[in-house]
Image (cartoon, rainbow, N blue to C red):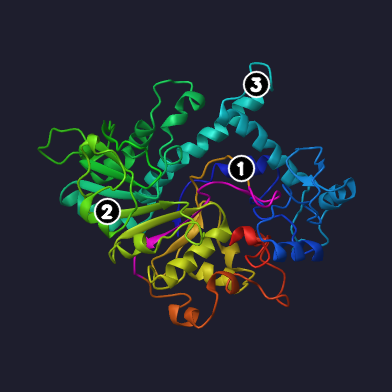
Amino acid sequence: IFCLAVPPTMDLLASLHLDALPEQQTRTSRPSVAKALTNNPDIKLGFDACCTCAAPDVSVKCKGCGRVSYCSNKCRKEDANPPDDESQQLGHGSVVCALLRLCDNDEDVDEGSVGGDQKDDGAMEASRDRVRSEFESYPATLANVLMGGPAYQDVITHQSQGSGTLTVHIVGASAGVELWGDYQSNMFSDPDTDVYEAYAEALTDLVEMHNLEKIHLVFIGPDCPKKNVKQVKQITCYGGEGGGRKKGNKKSPCLLIETHKSNYDAAYLKNGPEFGSRSAGNCSPPPTANIVVFFNPGFTCSDYSWDGALSCIPAGVPFLVTTNTEMEAVADCQYLLVQNFIDALPQLVSDIINGDESGGDKQDDGEVQEEDCGIFFGENPFAGMRVRQSGNMANDVFVKNRWMIGGVRGKGLFGLKRKSLQKRQQVDSSLVEEKEDKKKKRKKLKGNTKKSNPALI
């Protein structure tokens, strides 16, 4: 176990008297809902179908948040009633409604549509803090997890004692997400705030701790900026032995950032970016990655294909993956196992899959469980405070980057072995499904399984 800070999201949850974020709370067990989802998995409960019975009528909205729709007041009231027992989804209770009300304010701030006297200044300032924290969660997660995660220390130390440069590939990056510079005018009171400066500031402690001369971040993805970027930011060190410089080296440490509009595959690693403008002068093949990072990749989403990207990452390279929900993190772990990217699942993930009630209760706030297999799994202490509403199930909420998986590619000795996993068919649904005759779900996992909630597939 390595200890990190208490997640800032927990401050928000504590104000709502919550121990954990209620992620999947849309009720799907009603026969009419199950039938509707079977006939049309693309329906969106609470958006284009009644959130309670799945009827196509959505003429009635929640009076509290206005973000969940029903066919009648009867269905609206039924969805707001407490569940019969604590193993069931909350539905649209007071907790979910309160979280969804925050979404309205946050979206107004994000879109820059808040007028001078439209809403309470205090509420809008809180929204700005939440939206800002989501953007800042990318550099904060990158810097702090690399600095505190045991899986990364050997390679960082090796680079520090060798070339002095640590190269990190951030795969699947997008403009406006990991590279959120387009939003700076709305988000920050200081007009000079720069996304690249944010990464440089976040990485200062890592540079000081390991006496690195340079950190090279390469953001790769088809949704990166149209024109490939190459920028150098100086890193100001205030302490530490050598302040990020080797003995006799008078140069200040720096952060080199490149963006490559390209797929991440063998062709890219050999020839350089395929889509971006070549006028930026950084179209040569990227330097070899010491660490590879994926922010919310959606490995099991049918809209993307990650096989080529994962296959070109050599064994022994440390990696970090973040996801929005615990269920997505479990599914991504399974995907990585099937793809031979990891040799075993962390024991905590195995417990979740097998319906172990106590497995997740061993983890305290701010602690991330690293198993004997060298793979860690848990909540990300550096996720932001912004809660978002699912676009498929109206009572489902999530926080970006809230869960994380990390370790070393192809290094694992313990957990649920691949051989036993491959004996099962339809990995992404059957392993996550819990049998009806099992005991009630582990408290932290109250929510829908992938079989009962197509939005999670």
Compare residues 58 and 362 and report the one nearer the observer. Answer: 58
- Our reading of the magenta stretch's main secondary structure is loop
- Quadrant holding the N terminus: bottom left
The span picked out in magenta is 390-411
Q: Name the residue under label 1.
A: 387
- Quadrant holding the C terminus: bottom right
Q: Is mark 3 on a helix, strand or loop?
A: helix
Q: Name the residue under label 3.
A: 121
Q: Above or below — where is 307 with respect to 11?
A: below
- Residue 415, horizontal then vertical, whole percent: 46, 75
Mark toward the viewer: 3 or 2: 2
Specify the amino acid type for callout 2: Tyr
Nearer-N-terminus badge (3/2): 3
Disc 1 to disc 3, C-alpha distance: 20 Å
Count all numbered tags in the image, as a single digit: 3
Disc 2 to disc 1, C-alpha distance: 35 Å
Q: Name the residue under label 2.
A: 268
Q: Residue furthest top?
A: 116
Whether pointer 3 and pointer 2 mark residues with C-beta atoms closer than 8 Å, the reply is: no
Compare residues 235 and 106 and report the one nearer the observer. Answer: 106
- Residue 230, horizontal then vertical, whole percent: 26, 36
Mark toward the viewer: 2 or 1: 2
Q: Above or below — where is 136 with respect to 119?
A: below
Residue for point 74% across, 49% down: 46
Left or right placement of residue 91 versus residue 105 in this view? right
Specify the amino acid type for callout 3: Asp
